[in-house]
Amino acid sequence: MAELVSIGTIAAELGLSPSYIRLLTDHGLFEAHRTAGGHRRYDLAATRQAIADCECDTGCPSCVQSPKCGSGNEPLSKDGALLLLDRLLAPRGGRGRK
Ligand SMILES: [Zn+2]
């Protein structure tokens, strides 16, 4: 069964605010499921696999680009997204986490 993580876990792991993670989600970088209570839960392994399996080289609307991006998708990168997801999916521990 896929591990679903909360927005707080992703934000803490990346050192970013939850609101920025919400923004990235709204732009399509992360795919979130909603709990019955309306909270976002993220399947990072499935997200990474979908990006890695995309046939493009540097990123396209099917994987990391968004029609909502106000910067013409200039800052969005397939390699960057894979690096970010690899970091999130790396085994945790040794960093003082409970
Ligand atoms: Zn693509």
Image (spheres, rainbow, N blue to C red):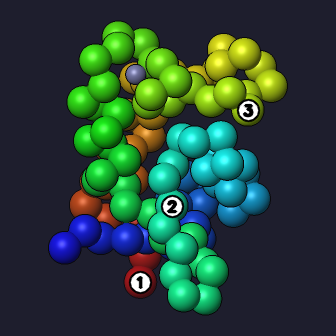
**Depth check, front residue: 86 or 4:** 4
Q: Dot 1, crowdedness within 10 Å: few (<14), some or many (≥20)? A: few
**Residue farthest top in this picture:** 57
Lateral position of residue 54 relative to residue 13, left or right: left
Residue pictured at 35% horizontal, 33% vertical: 51
Local secondary structure at mark 1:
loop
Give the residue type at disc 3.
Lys
- Please report whichever mark, 1 or 3, sits nearer to the chain's N-terminal start: 3
Query: Measured along the vertical axis of the image, is residue 16 above or below residue 6?
Result: above
Relative height, residue 44 to residue 37 (above, below) = above
Cα separation between marks 2 and 3? 17 Å
> Label 3 CB, ligand 1: below 8 Å?
no
Q: In the orientation shown, which residue stands out farthest toward the bottom?
A: 37
Residue 63, percent across and down? 44, 30
Residue type highlighted by circle 1 = Lys
Tell me the tag on residue 71: none
Q: Quadrant of residue 7?
A: bottom right
Q: Which residue is mark 2?
A: 32
Give the class, few, some or many, for how many residues have Cα within 10 Å of label 3's Cα (few <14, many ≥20).
Answer: few
Residue depicted at 43% across the width and 70% down the height: 5
Say which element carries label 2: strand
Q: Is residue 53 left or right of residue 21?
A: left
Crowd rating for badge 2 (residues with CA inside 10 Å; few <14, some 14–19, many 20+):
many
Q: Which mark is residue 68?
A: 3
Please tell me which residue lies in front, 61 or 51.
61
Tell me the kind of residue under disc 2.
Ala
Which of these two is toward me, 98 or 47? Answer: 47
- At 72% from the left and 16% from the top, the residue drawn is 72
Q: For the residues carrying marks 2 and 1, which lies nearer the camera in this image? A: 2
In the rendering, at what x and y percent does residue 3 appear? 29, 70
Reading the image, the residue beneath label 1 is 98
Q: Which quadrant is the C terminus positioned in?
A: bottom left
